[in-house]
Amino acid sequence: MRSITTVALSAALLGSASLLPASAQESFDSTQKQAIETIVRDYLIANPEVLVEAMSALQAKQDEQQKTAQASVIESARDQLTSAPEGMVFGNPDGDVTITEFFDYNCGYCKQALADMTALLEEDDQIRFVVKEFPILGVGSLEASRVAMAVRDLAPEKYRGFHEALLERRGSADKAAALGVAEELGVDPAKIEEKLAASANMKALQDIQTLASDLRINGTPTYVIGDEVLQARVGLEGLKAVVGSMRACGKVECS
């Protein structure tokens, strides 16, 4: 009975003897398997906190595995992550800390995060901030990003102004809204339409989508700093803390 109890306890977090390795299952007859399942059931009913502990441990393990996988992608795609065409690097182009943000013009949190970025760049003149158009919230978002990238090509010096104005604008972002912002900034809508008709920048957007997929990014705003991916709006203080850690130890969080 000692061996049954040992194996049963080892299998407790799996839920039943049927989930044991095949080699272990072959070691028990039907009566023993039923005994294991009874022990498991009784143990979990008596100690339900074990399930919470197991789920927490599983989540921690999965998070660590994801961080490891993301760090590998970041290392291999470092240039793609930290470089950007003229106009899409804000702050100090030679700054000592680079922050890359994936954003969507229709993302409410991205609109709030704009203030975080602006304040950070005003306070710290050594930040290099790279923005990546990542339209994942529908057709309107894709339209807005395509117009944005046309603005970047036609007038890179006006891209940041466009970026900020469209994020600050109330209501949904789509082609009409983006063209309106571009025109207000003095970029000819007719020239933008020419680029859109020629499917300009679609490959660039597809490349960003592929990079985001490789990094397992599925929401906005998402920041890539150092070797880590932060999938949330972390706020101004959060960004400042990360920047401080990067300067102190080269990591998002110093041990």
Image (tube, rainbow, N blue to C red):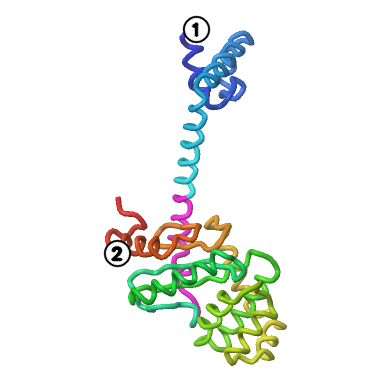
Q: Amino acid at mark 2?
A: Arg
Image position of 120 (left or right of 223): left
Give the Cα separation between the discs numbered 1 and 2: 58 Å
Q: Specify start and end residues of the magenta stretch as a single range.
A: 67-85
Image position of 42 (left or right of 143): left
Dot 1: within a 10 Å radius of its alpha carbon, few (fewer than 14), some, or many (20 or more) residues? Answer: few
Q: Which residue is mark 2?
A: 247
In this view, the residue farthest toward the left is 248
From what the image shows, is residue 165 above or below residue 21?
below
The magenta stretch spans residue 68: yes
**Nearer the N terminus, badge 1 or badge 2?**
1
Residue 72, percent from left and from top? 45, 55
Residue 24, percent from left and from top? 55, 19
> Quick one: 235 or 138, which is closer to the camera?
235
Q: Residue at x 46, y 9 (%)?
A: 2
Q: Which residue is mark 1?
A: 1
The magenta stretch spans residue 132: no
Q: Residue at x 52, y 22 (%)?
A: 12
Toward which corner of the image does residue 123 lie, by quadrant? bottom left
From what the image shows, is residue 14 above or below residue 147?
above
Residue 198's label in the rendered image is none
> Quick one: 156 or 186, which is closer to the camera?
186
Q: Residue at x 52, y 86 (%)?
A: 156
- Secondary structure of the residue carrying numbered label 2: helix
Contact between labelled residues 2 and 1, with CB atoms less than 8 Å apart = no
